[in-house]
Amino acid sequence: MPLPRPVRERCREFLAVDGQIRYIFPASARGGGAGFLFVVTDDRIAVLSTGSLGRSRPDGVWGSYPRGTRLGPVETGGGASFEFAGASFELDDEYVPVLNAADAEVFARDSLPRDPLPDL
């Protein structure tokens, strides 16, 4: 499920991102607690902290990484989780395809579906 436009706009304002946000998904620290928004642009992966009360309002930048940094793989036994930048995160199953697509765009471009309307 895509995150609502207001969440995307808060991220854009918070990071002063001029480029296109390609992917965005919420995650939490493994075992509960702090929430995060992973914002993938054309050249960066920004991890915004949201605190423990909600996942829709960023309150700080946890980290910023080059776009060539791999997000996955996602472990799916006992809930979806992944390791990133030395930390463990959990995410809802519905966002696993978003994380996988973000990685595939950089690391497995041939696995992405072809654009059905390449001339637009």
Image: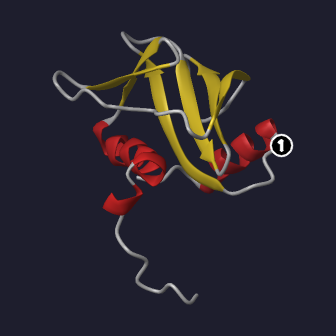
Q: Furthest-bottom residue in view? A: 119
Residue beneath disc 1: 16
Residue 55 shows up from this direction = no
69 is higher (above) or lower (below) than 77: below
Residue 45: x %, y % from top left: 61, 36
Residue at x-position 33% and y-position 41%: 96
The quarter of the picture where residue 30 lies is top left
The quarter of the picture where residue 61 lies is top right
Residue at x-position 63% and y-position 22%: 49
Q: Quadrant of the C terminus?
A: bottom right
Q: Secondary structure at mark 1?
A: loop
Q: Is residue 20 left or right of residue 68?
A: right
Residue 117 shows up from this direction = yes
Residue 6: x %, y % from top left: 67, 50
Q: Is residue 93 left or right of residue 104?
A: left
60 is higher (above) or lower (below) than 119: above
The one of 111 and 55 positioned closer to us in this rendering: 111
The amino acid beneath tag 1 is Ala
Residue 71: x %, y % from top left: 45, 33
Residue 66: x %, y % from top left: 64, 35
